[in-house]
Amino acid sequence: MTTITFIHHDNRSQSVEAADGDSLMLAALTHGVDGITAECGGNAVCATCHVYVDEAWTAKLDPVSDDEDALLDGTAAERLPNSRLSCQIKVQPALAGLVVRIPDKQS
Amino acid sequence: MNPTNHSQNSGVAPGIPHLAIDPFSYDFFDDPYPAHQEMREAGPVVYLDQWNVYGVARYAEVYAVFNDPQTFCSSRGVGLSDFAKEKPWRPPSLILEADPPAHTRTRAVLSKVLSPAVMKRLRDGFMVAAEAKIDELLARGSFDAIPHLAEAYPLSVFPDALGLQAAGREHLIPYASLVFNAFGPPNELRQQAIERSAPHQAYVTAQCQRDNLTPGGFGACIHAFSDTGEITPAEAPLLVRSLLSAGLDTTVYGIGAAVYCLARFPDQWARLRDDPSLARNAFEEAVRFESPVQTFFRTTTVDVELGGVVIPEGEKVLMFLGAANRDPRRWEQPDSYDITRKVSGHVGFGSGIHMCVGQLVARLEGEAVLTALARKVGAITMSGEPTRRYNNTLRGLESLPVTFTPA
Ligand code: HEM
Ligand code: FES
């Protein structure tokens, strides 16, 4: 289990104990964190699992793949340098304390 | 009817429940739900004696088969016919009926052509077209929602987005219906569809050529990838064909399903009217609830254990998407249509590497229609008995007489 903090658009923060190996998207869905739609269920098609990764963490994640990069161009909320797709981030002990912000809209 | 090509009964693993259900019969199409339940309850894997195929109807096994394409391949056909034993009725699809690494390359092209960024550019036009369609239908009052909405709306946006010429578009729905009937067994639906296929095939083959596709459309974009070497010039027309096969009729059935749900469940219609921003999820939930694409097959590439039984190499496995989408092991109150359900994870668009590459187009169309309905229509009442349209793969209606009253 790894602690991940989601900060909603209204600044409400929600910390969950996520299972290692799950994607960040799945951790949000299984813990009832709203605001991550994940229409494609993690198959890297939809870009509705968009999050902004806290600046302190961006460099610690695996880099964005070409596929993810192309999908991020289609997010409903503005793409920022710290934009990621939460279905492409794997929960692991090294990410303990990770903080991500949820955009105001996903579609 | 004796499907001699498929009867290889000798290798059936012991302990698998044998069922007499024919999932491609008219009785089944009229009401598949008792049979879905029977299959789910019989076990994680069942054997369907009528067509000599293995079946999976529970969510967990359907998901597992979708997500193990190396063991459960698509290149031997995603219908009953095994391409290793039987000549396919048309040249196989370069994406749907392909395995990695070939699939990976063609899939990358269609993913780019139908990406979220492309949808952003199409969005406003699709929304405006839906509003115009609903205004027209409100003026009309009473009409059949299948031809006049479920078919008319996709026909008003999709062929143009693809870049098709105006002439001959009447072939599109019959061609798609043929494609989806052909995934089924050699029953009356399949045989008749193939017998009548020649003019539709001729139309589609011609329209897939580069010269016949308007610049800027999905078709022309696919051909452009042959200039940069991602695909060959010979592959491009076949990839355009995939959009002609899978991109129109599926959304007709999807929109038909959503309108049928909203007409049947007034409480959900009321919620949608209160909050039109639920339109997209209401469409998605209709895709789960009705599962317009009901089934697809895979073929085993090795002996494999699934749900405690061993399926030998070279067997057809039939996935029941509609049954998985209502499996009580996965879904709370699976038989209720709930437009606020957290529906992520349903398999109505498939799952894994072949998961519908056109799903964003389908959702955009669905969202556009349901948003316009929610904003403009006060009540949807059924003004006659709906009738079913029969297809070996697609589930939906032939006719849905309704009356719209303005908001
Ligand atoms: C409600 C509408 C739709 C439904 C329910 C639907 C359903 C599906 C399903 C279940 C699959 C998986 C097939 C498999 O795993 O063997 C699939 C694949 C596919 N769909 Fe859709 N679809 C819809 C709309 C569309 C649209 C609008 C397009 C094109 C613009 C499209 C193009 C495709 C293609 C090309 C594939 C093959 C993808 C691959 O093999 O990688 N579909 N669809
Ligand atoms: S859930 Fe669809 S791209 Fe992440």
Image (tube, helix red, strand yellow):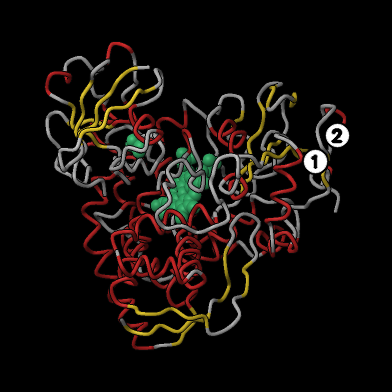
Front one among B136 and B184: B136
- Does residue B145 show up? yes
Whether B295 is drawn above or below B399: the answer is above
- Mark 2 lies on a secondary structure that is helix
Q: Quadrant of ligand 2?
A: top left
Left or right: B343, with B399 as reference point: left
Q: Label 2, on which residue?
A: B9
Which quadrant of the view contains residue A54?
Answer: top left
Q: Give the image location of residue B207, x and y in percent.
A: 42, 58
Q: Earlier in the sequence, mark 2 or mark 1?
A: 2
Whether B248 is drawn above or below B151: the answer is above
Q: Amino acid at mark 1?
A: Asn
Q: Label 1, on which residue?
A: B52
User: Residue under mark 1: which chain is it in?
Assistant: B
Q: Give the image location of residue B131, x and y in percent.
A: 28, 73
Left or right: B341, with A17 as reference point: right
Mark 1 nearby-residue class (10 Å; few <14, some 14–19, many ≥20): many
Identity of the residue drawn at 20% across and 14% down: A60
- Mark 1 lies on a secondary structure that is loop
Q: Are marks 2 and 1 in contact (CB under 8 Å)?
A: yes
Numbered circle sitting on residue B194: none
